Every structure is written in C-alpha cells, then in structure tokens.
C-alpha cells in the first residue's frame, strides 16, 4: 500500500504544483470554444505554507476509528463523493471541497481500528458523483453511499498505465520541431486537441484527450526560431469544458 500511495501522491502533488506555477506566471487562458477554468491563484508569500492536502492529512490523524475519519472530513467542509474501496485493511474516499477533489487513502494494519497510514492525494480519475459535485455545489446523493465493488475510480488502478502513456507521448513529441508539427503528431497518436490554454511566442499549451484520459502538453518555444525547446506532458487537474465533455462521452461508452 505504501509504495502505491507514495507514487499516487507524488503524481498528484506534482500536478498541483504545475498548475500553481502556471497560475503564478500566466494571466490569460483561451480555448477554441469555451474558456478554460482559471487556475487557482497562488500567493507568493504563502508558497511555503502547508498544502490543503497536507493540512487535511494532519486533521485526519486525530481520528481513532473509521467513523471518526468520515466525521472529520465532513466537519471540515469536505463532501464524500464516492467510496472507491472499503476493505478490512484499506479505505479510500473521493472527497470534494469547492472546485477541488482528492482521494483520501487510509491503511489499517491487520484490520486495526485506527489508521496506520493516511494519505491525501490529488484525484485524477474521478467517479461520476465527484464530477457532479465539482459542477454543482448543491448536488447530493440520492441513495446511501456504498463502496464501488470494482474500485473503478481508484487512482492506483490507472497510475502505471498513465505514467507509461505520459512517457510514450513525451518520446513521440521531441523538442526542436516547429510548433505547427506537434498538432499532426498528437493527432496521429489518436488524440484530439480539445483546448488551447496558452499560445504565445515563447509558450504553447494544449489539452488533449483520447478515451477517458486527458493530458496537458506544454511546449516552450524559442521566440526567434519558433522551434520547441522543451516538451512537458502532465495530466489535467482542471479540464476545460471541451476536454471534460470528450472524456465524459468516452466514460459513458464504457459503462
């Protein structure tokens, strides 16, 4: 459990950090049809402050039983959107607060009452109810919440495949090409460019989608030659509306 949780947490925190850095250095966002949601504002004075996920982890450490953890989440303004897994030695929630969602991962060694390991990670593959809560602050479950028997939305199920695909994309998109060449390369791999989050002389950022996965492709450009200097592929923590619609349609087809 610890290795899996560590990998997921690293990926989630790295993605959140990328989004924060982008928000601090860029002021405009455009998409082909609908403006992408603004990335959260980052106050430079507070960059060393504990992240929201770290703060939540600390609060959860006060719990003594499974029911305590749920109470702590709800008393701190988190809505439990889904239970991804509920086993004797492991419990995983998807929770929503404002425009963010997280996975809360709780290990119980040998079925202990109190969690032996607590991790709060960025939520990359979201359950349907999580998506609805993010879009509608008034959404409530219409029936009692139960664990998904197949753990379909637990990030641990997809993180290796996601990392493999990320590496494949980065290898297929080498630097030193003209910006215009990347669009055809991306499309030749079966991806659709669903949004353009940034297009300047020195930086271009695409959102791309295939199936129910989406990525951000960030291209640093030499403003003189218009050749790419660096390519970075990350996942989307906040998808633009066209990207969200594309992945939702793919998800619906697989049900």
Image: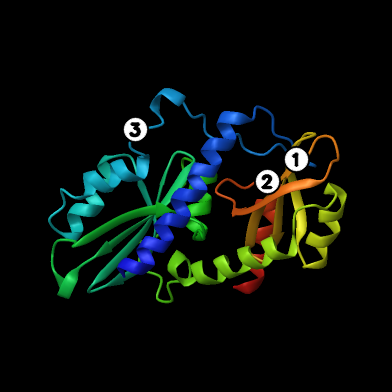
Q: Is residue 46 above or below residue 169?
A: above
Viewer-closest of 252 and 188: 188
Q: Is residue 141 visible?
A: no
Q: How far is disc 1 from disc 3 in space, using C-alphas? A: 32 Å
Q: Which quadrant of the figure contains the C terminus?
A: bottom right
For the point 78% across and 39% down, the residue is 222
Judging from the image, what secondary structure is the residue with disc 2 in?
helix
Which residue is the site of mark 2?
241
For the point 27% across and 62% down, the residue is 106
Any mark on residue 49, and which?
3
Q: CB of mark 1 within 8 Å of CB of mark 3?
A: no
Any mark on residue 31, and which?
1
Q: How far is disc 3 from disc 2 in space, using C-alphas? A: 31 Å
Give the percent coordinates (x, y) of residue 149. 40, 76
For the point 23% across and 61% down, the residue is 117
Q: How far is disc 1 from disc 2 in space, using C-alphas? A: 9 Å
The disc, 1 or 2, on the residue closer to the chain's N-terminal end is 1
Q: CB of mark 1 within 8 Å of CB of mark 2?
A: yes
Q: Which dot, 1 or 3, sits closer to the camera?
A: 3
């Amino acid at each position: 459990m610890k290795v899996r949780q560590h990998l997921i947490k690293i990926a989630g925190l790295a993605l959140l950090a990328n989004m924060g850095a982008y928000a601090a250095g860029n002021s405009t966002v455009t998409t082909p049809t609908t403006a992408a949601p603004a990335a959260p504002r980052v106050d430079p004075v507070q960059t060393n402050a504990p992240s929201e996920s770290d703060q939540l982890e600390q609060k959860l450490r006060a719990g003594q039983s499974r029911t305590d953890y749920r109470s702590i989440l709800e008393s701190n303004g988190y809505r439990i959107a889904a239970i991804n897994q509920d086993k004797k030695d492991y419990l995983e929630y998807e929770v929503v607060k404002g425009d963010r969602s997280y996975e809360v991962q709780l290990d119980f060694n040998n079925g202990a009452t109190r969690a032996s390991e607590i991790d709060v990670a960025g939520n990359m593959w979201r359950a349907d109810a999580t998506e609805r809560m993010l879009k509608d602050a008034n959404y409530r479950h219409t029936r009692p919440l139960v664990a998904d028997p197949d753990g379909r939305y637990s990030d641990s199920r997809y993180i290796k495949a996601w990392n493999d695909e990320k590496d494949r994309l980065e290898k297929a998109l080498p630097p030193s090409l003209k910006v215009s060449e990347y669009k055809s390369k991306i499309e030749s791999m079966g991806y659709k460019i669903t949004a353009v989050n940034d297009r300047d002389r020195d930086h271009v950022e695409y959102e791309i989608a295939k199936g129910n996965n989406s990525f951000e492709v960030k291209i640093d450009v030499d403003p003189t030659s218009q050749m790419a200097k660096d390519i970075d592929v990350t996942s989307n923590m906040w998808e633009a509306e066209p990207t969200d619609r594309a992945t939702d349609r793919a998800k619906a087809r697989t049900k």
